[in-house]
Image (cartoon, rainbow, N blue to C red):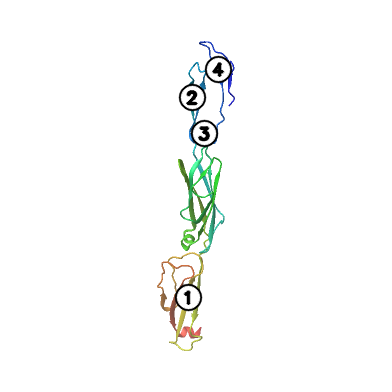
Amino acid sequence: GNLVCVPANGSSLAPGASLSCTADHTVTQADIDAGHYLNTACVDDGEGGAAQACDDANVPATSNAHLTIVKDATEESFNSVGDVIHYSITASNDGNTTLSNVTVTDADAVNLVCVPANGSSLAPGASMDCTAEHTVTQADIDAGHYLNTACVSATDATATCDDADVPSDQKPHLTIVKDATEQSFSSVGDVIHYTITATNDGNTTLTNVNVTDPNAANLVCVPATPVSSLAPGASIECTADHTITQADIDA
């Protein structure tokens, strides 16, 4: 555009004389994506007396193919198996070239949905918005957190990733209930029989769980104690007994 010549186009030109012109071109996205802008100028005498002559200028584009990704979790923590963590993911083309085959991946989440769809092209400044989710397992609670990473890639652009780490709200807790079968005793040698139930009523798997009863004998537990791993809701069932002494009756 804006071609201006001195002397003006259409003028006569003596041997050795020149026509000096200026012009310009405003760069488009297509020029950047092409990697260069090739432009050709030609001169002729309009009457066919001289052969047309042309020359071009090819200016390269400085390409900056670049992606960013931001991943956030809606929930700030979790505490139960079956809780669902919801993720929002925004992948953006913050470079200066149109990127093709833009794809977001999230290997440790499910139900990944992106707008525009994965595999689309993304112009500079445009974004792909995605959602995904993860259903909490007991292993996540026991680990104390759930770390999840999403990545975005495109043709001719370096892949980049971002993660969201959501902590678990751990509540380790035990209860124990002890009952005696006999309601009373009256003689030395009577035997009091006990049932003991120890339960993990917290939300974390507990290790090395041990039941003790120093003033009873024949303590037997199922599973045998110490229990290496007791899941939430699981129990240890024990029995024990005590043979009555005179001191017990006197007390």
Check disc 3 and report the residue beneath it: 31
Frontmost residue, 31 versus 156: 31
Question: For residue 197, which numbered disc appears in the image?
Answer: 1
Seen as rendered, the residue at the extreme bottom is: 187
Check disc 2 and report the residue beneath it: 56
Frontmost residue, 33 versus 220: 33
Q: Foreground mark, 3 or 4? A: 4
Cβ–Cβ under 8 Å for marks 1 and 2: no
What is the x, y in percent for residue 133? 52, 57
Q: Foreground mark, 1 or 3? A: 3
Frontmost residue, 27 versus 234: 27
User: Counting residues from the N terminus, which is met first, the one under dot 3 or under dot 4?
Assistant: 4
What crowding class fits label 3: few (fewer than 14 Cα within 10 Å), some (14-19), or many (20 or more)? some
User: Counting residues from the N terminus, which is met first, the one under dot 2 or under dot 3?
Assistant: 3
Q: Secondary structure at mark 4?
A: strand
User: Counting residues from the N terminus, which is met first, the one under dot 1 or under dot 3?
Assistant: 3
Mark 3: amino acid: Asp
What is the x, y in percent for residue 237? 45, 76
Mark 2: amino acid: Asp
At 50% from the left and 36% from the top, the residue drawn is 33
Spatial separation of the CA atoms under disc 2 and disc 3: 16 Å
Mark 4: amino acid: Ser
Cβ–Cβ under 8 Å for marks 1 and 3: no
At 52% from the left and 54% from the top, the residue drawn is 113
